[in-house]
Amino acid sequence: MAAGGVPVRAARKNAPPREDVLVAAMATIAERGLEGLTMAGLGREVGMSSGHLLYYFRSKDELLLQTLEWSEAALGDQRRALLSRRGPVRERLREYVDLYVPEHARDPHWTLWLEVWNRSQTAGPEERDRQAAIEGAWHRDLVALLAEGISRGEFRPVDADRFATRTRALLDGFSIQLAVGLPLLSREEILSHVAEFLTEGLAPTSSPAGV
């Protein structure tokens, strides 16, 4: 079988590292959106034909999802480091929130999410399952942090799963506003609102310390 008129063996030999393609795709999508990305343009940037890219990724939607999965893998490593570290859970929870919230408008990672969500209604079962797996990892790690804080007495007893669901809904709402550039709240104000929500919901009633 050939890709773009070139034997597959030669295409694999001459192709740039997969990560180079994903880095370039992420930068282009962050700057111009998925509609502004073409396989021909991306191919020129990485020195690869559009036919080769289609062989490896099949479609722009698949390229988008693989780029998100690659970006999420790096964030997953950072979350696991948070979970494994010692020290107050409330400090690690703040770091989790900081990792979750976009840095600025058109944050590359969050732009990928917005594009994926935009296509969710027409996505197939496999694509939906892959997206759910990514979101599920964020949820499980937050539940683990909450459960640890409860077991150590840093947080009041709550249903960790339900509290994590509400927390992520709050984070998603604020993060979307920031990622699309709505001039409502700064990142610092968003972090302050989230910290207040966590303090009110988690701080032990016998302790005035914030979360």
Image: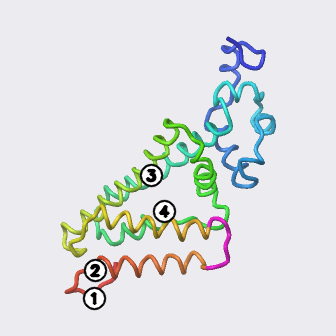
Nearest to viewer (mark 2 / mark 4): 2
Whole-number angstrom distance, CA of label 1 to CA of label 2 = 7 Å
**Dot 1 or dot 2, earlier in sequence:** 2
**Residue 100 horizontal/vertical position (percent):** 49, 62
**Amino acid type, callout 1:** Pro
Q: Quadrant of the C terminus?
A: bottom left
* Closer to the camera in the image, 78 or 108: 108
Q: Is residue 180 magenta?
A: yes
Q: Position of residue 72 (x, y in %)?
A: 51, 48
**What's drawn in magenta, residue-wise?**
179-184
* Secondary structure of residue under mark 4: helix
The answer to whether residue 30 is above or below residue 4 is below
Element carrying mark 3: helix
Q: For the residue carrying disc 2, how many other residues have a C-alpha within 10 Å: few (<14), some (14-19), or many (20+)?
A: many
- Mark 3 and mark 1 residues within 8 Å of each other at the beta carbon: no
Mark carried by residue 203: 2
Q: Earlier in the sequence, mark 3 or mark 4?
A: 4
Percent coordinates x, y for residue 32 in the rendering: 76, 53
Question: Is 51 on the left-hand or right-hand side of 151?
Answer: right
Alpha-carbon span between mark 3 and mark 4: 14 Å
Instruction: Give the mark nearer the N terminus: 1 vs 4.
Output: 4
Quadrant assignment, res 20: top right
Q: Which residue is mark 3?
A: 135
